[in-house]
Image (cartoon, grey):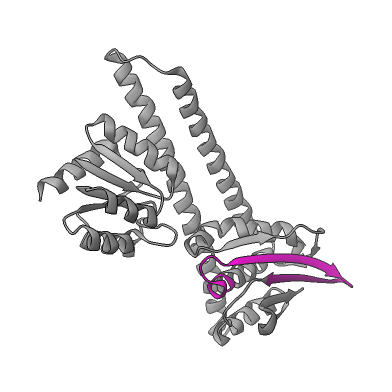
């Protein structure tokens, strides 16, 4: 076994860590909001004990806010669970649209920090065989580099299509050229994911064929 | 005592501002660095509570901008992240650094301590 095997594992581990950190940050925010809303309920109760009149509609609104955050947290944990289970099988049936949607959700915070909007265009179901974890890593890396290329207030569109047994994922809306080393990294991950990347600078698009 | 709360989670800062008002603080809140800059231009705040990680402008960047407008303000940083780098940066540059979710009593204590150190 050469030196590249541990490195390969580490790349995947780094990606897993990056996504897990983003999820933990989102969950911390959810908990912080629930904490403050519960604190407000406690404040109202203490003030009511001192004679202040309670405002039932306000209490209902607060309860709805807490329920809304529980729903938000549940959605984050569901995505986290799907992501965690993506390492279960190295190669299996893959729904590329579903997988792309999941990666976009997982990268919401990163997109927000980079001030870029990412849209998955409506379209047909695109299925195939592949390694879900590596495909997610490829889409996530490609999106991150595309966000950097698009710049602040950039808008990235992702399209998925299938023709003659070839699945195609296209990211458009790039602006500045993607650096050579990033393209080389995408190429390397793409090979592991069973795909083939193409970058078309004049059209500002990044294409992956599976 | 006038306080400004800045966090991109509106539900969090609005609830926190209300809870602080029950404890005798005059607290305003905004959800972005740009809005915080406008508020500080319009009003004189004693202290700002800033989220470390916000879109467009981080808490640390915002602090530098606000210092240019009003040099005497005190700062407390809030983060859900709690990374070591954030902690080091926050601890070195801020009066105080708290990790979400925070206890209101602890925040009030830290606000009072920061304002007493003037």
Residue at 53 percent of width and 43 percent of height: A73
In this view, the residue in front, A35 or B48, is: B48
Q: In this view, does A18 lie to the left or right of B89?
A: right
- The reply to whether residue A165 is visible in this rendering is yes
- The reply to whether residue B78 is visible in this rendering is no
Residue A47 placement (x, y as % from top left): 30, 19
Residue at 52 percent of width and 73 percent of height: A10
Is B1 covered by the magenta stretch?
no
Residue B48 placement (x, y as % from top left): 26, 50
Residue A189 placement (x, y as % from top left): 63, 77
Residue at 53 percent of width and 62 percent of height: A111
Where, quadrant-wise, is the C terminus of chain A in this rendering?
bottom right
Residue B6 drawn above or below residue A35: below
Q: Is residue A131 left or right of residue B71?
A: right
Residue A192 drawn above or below residue A159: below
Q: Which residue lies furthest to the front in this view?
A: B42
Residue at 35 percent of width and 14 percent of height: A53
Q: Is residue B21 left or right of residue A18?
A: left
Is A150 covered by the magenta stretch?
yes
Which residues are drawn in magenta? A146-171
């Amino acid at each position: 076994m050469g030196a590249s095997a541990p490195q390969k594992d580490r790349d995947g581990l780094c990606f897993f860590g990056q996504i897990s950190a983003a999820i933990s940050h989102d969950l911390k925010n959810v908990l912080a909001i629930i904490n403050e809303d519960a604190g407000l309920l406690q404040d109202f109760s203490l003030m009511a004990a001192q004679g202040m009149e309670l405002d039932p509609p306000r209490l209902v609104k607060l309860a709805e806010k807490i329920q809304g955050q529980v729903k938000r947290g549940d959605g984050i944990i569901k995505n986290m669970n799907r992501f965690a289970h993506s390492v279960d099988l190295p190669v299996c049936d893959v729904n590329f649209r579903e997988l792309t949607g999941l990666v976009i959700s997982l990268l919401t915070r990163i997109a927000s920090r980079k001030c870029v909007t990412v849209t998955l265009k409506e379209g047909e179901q695109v299925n195939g065989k592949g390694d879900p974890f590596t495909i997610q890593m490829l889409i996530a890396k490609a999106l991150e580099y595309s966000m950097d290329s698009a710049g602040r207030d950039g808008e990235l569109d992702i399209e998925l299509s299938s023709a003659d047994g070839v699945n195609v994922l296209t990211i458009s809306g790039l602006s500045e050229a993607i650096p050579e080393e990033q393209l080389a990294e995408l190429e390397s991950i793409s090979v592991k994911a069973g795909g083939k990347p193409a970058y078309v600078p004049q059209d500002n698009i990044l294409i992956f064929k599976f | 005592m006038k306080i400004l709360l800045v966090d991109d989670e509106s539900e969090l800062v609005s609830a926190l501002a209300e809870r602080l008002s029950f404890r005798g603080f005059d607290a305003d809140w905004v959800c972005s660095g740009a809005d915080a800059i406008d508020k500080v231009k319009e009003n004189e705040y004693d202290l700002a509570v800033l989220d470390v990680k916000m879109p467009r402008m981080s808490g640390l960047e915002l602090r530098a901008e606000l210092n240019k407008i009003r040099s005497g303000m005190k700062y407390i940083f809030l983060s859900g992240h709690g990374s070591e780098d954030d902690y080091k940066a926050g601890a070195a540059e801020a009066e105080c650094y708290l990790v979400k979710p925070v206890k209101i009593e602890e925040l009030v204590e830290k606000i009072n301590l920061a304002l007493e150190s003037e």
